[in-house]
Amino acid sequence: MPVLVVVFGRFCSLTGHCILDWVTNWTPNHGQNYDPVPYRPARIPAEQALETSASLRARMDERRTVRAFSTDPVPEQLVLDAIAVASTAPSGAHQQPWTFVLVTDPDVRKQIREAAEEEERISYAGRLGEEWLDALRPLGTDDVKPHITDSPYLIVVFQQRFYIEPDGSTRKHYYVDESVGIAVGMLLTALHLSGLAALTHTPSPMRFLGEVLNRPRNERAFAVIPVGYPAEDCSVPNLTRKSLDQVMVRV
Ligand code: IYR
């Protein structure tokens, strides 16, 4: 039976909902039934929900991937909360197959930057292929990655491809790409709603990240995410997003 220890709960008077601050002592569930518990979130009146969804839509449309970060300090709790939000993501068989490595050690960040830039140099020099390089050209990205060392925080996200039992035997994880992708989406959303900017950086190949960060053999790097406030002179490409009509079909 998975062990869940609720250390304390907090009642949020703003929403009237009970928000629990969990400290969990999670253990993997090997084929045990979860005991159903009632789930009765208060129904939000439609008028209020529509206001919330419209403002969330507008707020999220302001999110931009940022490549130039301010060195202004960021309250660490914002980053911890965003990672905790990400870890509420749904996952295959509730296996939560993710590890978020919060890297602040300047030496480690330097090592990551050097290794990432070495891979990127090869990639931009032709490994990506002409078609891919053409697709990237309008964004103006290149092999120089100052944000890896210079942003206030660096989060390296790992997928746990399987679980390693204390006796060394392994158990497969399911839908790992999907689960970790959803978690990273929630991470980016949480960071943005806290006023922070991020970059989803995917150096390729990423094997060096597991080595530099000394991760166990069941983990595979998924993304490198510098976090901070945008630099004062930050600019972003003048992009437009697909309209709702372009991304949605009704059947
Ligand atoms: N990984 C490289 C290349 C790159 C690829 C895509 I797809 C992008 O949207 C942006 C960059 C890099 O991070 O520079």
Image (spheres, rainbow, N blue to C red):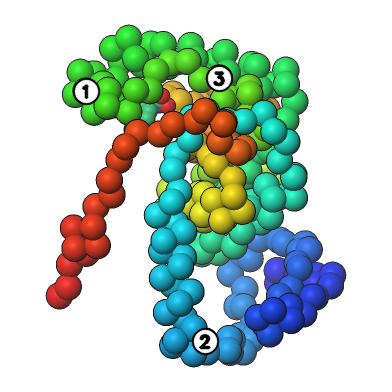
In space, the residues marked 1 and 2 are separated at their CA atoms by 47 Å
Residue indicated by mark 1: 134
For disc 2, the marked residue is 44
Q: Amino acid at mark 1?
A: Asp
Tag 3, which secondary structure? Answer: loop
Residue type at mark 2: give it: Ile
Residue 227 versus residue 210 in the image, above or below: below
Where is mark 3, residue-wise? 146
Is disc 1 surrounded by few (<14), some (14 to 19) or many (20+) residues within 10 Å? few
Question: Which quadrant is home to the C terminus?
Answer: bottom left
Q: Can you tell me whether the CB of the residue at mark 1 lies under 8 Å from the nearest atom of ligand 1?
A: no
Q: Where residue 60 appears, x then y in whole percent?
A: 44, 56
Alpha carbons under labels 1 and 3: distance apart: 23 Å
> On the rendered structure, is 153 left or right of 243?
right
Residue 227 location (% of width, % of height): 60, 38
Query: Looking at the image, in which quadrant does ligand 1 appear?
Result: top left
Pointer 2 or 3: first along the chain: 2
**Mark 3: is the Cβ under 8 angstroms from ligand 1?**
no
Label 2 lies in ligand 1 vicinity (Cβ under 8 Å): no
SS assignment at label 1: helix
Q: Quadrant of residue 148?
A: top right
Q: Is residue 210 visible?
A: no
Alpha-carbon neighbours of circle 2 within 10 Å: few (<14), some, or many (≥20)?
few
Identity of the residue furthest to the front in this view: 233
Mark 1–mark 2 CB contact (< 8 Å)? no
Local secondary structure at mark 2: loop
